[in-house]
Image: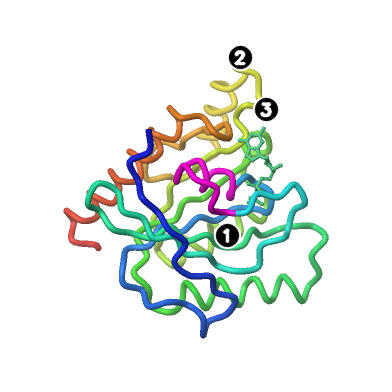
Amino acid sequence: MCAWKSELYCTAFNKQQLPPSNRPEIVFVGRSNVGKSTLINALLARKIAKVSSSPGKTRSINFYNVEAEGRLFSLVDIPGYGYAARGHGERQAWWKLIDDYFGSGRNISFVVHLIDFRHGPLPNDCDLTKWLDVKGLLRLVVFTKGDKISPGRRNGLYQQYMRSGIVSVLPPFVTSGVDDQEMEALRRGITEILDELGRMGDI
Ligand code: GDP
């Protein structure tokens, strides 16, 4: 059962619409169609983010305020990147929005980077990873669509990704849409990181 309480707090299409940064923010990033909305809905145990089978729809940054057993923080849903049908202009607009968000001195705790378990990190995942490294942001890797890989192949694939040098503050999670146990483990992982950052005085 999900003990987190959540509400959509703000939807921002540009810098002017970004809300004041008054809580630690956990930022969810990933390629279009990676399963970010599905994961956010599963994590918050409510249909709050829009799930779409046609990629590249979300253009706004959505802020969800969360209360998790006394902890107050926001989940920040960044539009997906790398949708092939997008033109140069749209990619520029995406980077501008990302730059505006990450460059405005916000209280960012860490980034949850979603990666499709079937494909592993693709070139634009790696571009984003390098960019986040430059910004010095902590990352938690979460693989999505684990259910699309047969149970017998999962462990081998996981080890293969780990050997390829994935950096993650906790061992990456593998998720399969809406699995209660997986979601509970991920909630615990997220609050563990927040608590540790709190002890270190980082938030
Ligand atoms: P977003 O664009 O990253 O927000 O992706 P969505 O959450 O909208 O999901 C894109 C598509 O992938 C939808 O058709 C989802 O039903 C599907 N999907 C998302 N996560 C999973 C998963 O873990 N397993 C499977 N099999 N399908 C998923």
Q: Is residue 74 left or right of residue 146?
A: left
Q: Is residue 44 magenta?
A: yes
Q: Amino acid at mark 2?
A: Gly
The residue at which mark 1 appears reads as 128
**Among numbered discs 1 and 2, the one appearing first in the sequence:** 1
Q: CA distance from mark 3 to mark 1?
A: 25 Å
The residue at which mark 2 appears reads as 152
Q: Residue 203: x and y, percent?
A: 25, 63
Q: Is residue 40 left or right of residue 119?
A: left
Q: Residue 86: x and y, percent?
A: 79, 65
**Is the CB atom of the residue marked by disc 2 within 8 angstroms of ligand 1's nearest atom?**
no
Give the prevailing secondary structure in the magenta stretch: helix
Quarter of the picture holding the N terminus: top left
- Find the magenta span and give its range: 36-49
Q: Is residue 115 magenta?
A: no
Looking at the rendering, the quadrant in which ligand 1 lies is top right
Instruction: Mark 2: give few (<14), some (14-19) or many (20+) Cα within 10 Å.
Output: few
Q: In terms of secondary structure, where does tag 3 sit?
A: helix
Q: Amino acid at mark 3?
A: Lys
Q: 72 or 56: which is nearer to us?
A: 72
Q: How many marks?
A: 3
Is 123 above or below relative to 100? above
**Is the CB atom of the residue marked by disc 3 within 8 angstroms of ligand 1's nearest atom?**
yes
Which residue: 45% across, 30% down?
A: 182
The residue at which mark 3 appears reads as 148
Q: Residue 114: x and y, percent?
A: 55, 47
Q: In terms of secondary structure, where does tag 2 sit?
A: helix
Q: In terms of secondary structure, where does tag 1 sit?
A: helix
Instruction: Mark 3: give few (<14), some (14-19) or many (20+) Cα within 10 Å.
Output: few
Q: CA distance from mark 2 to mark 3?
A: 12 Å
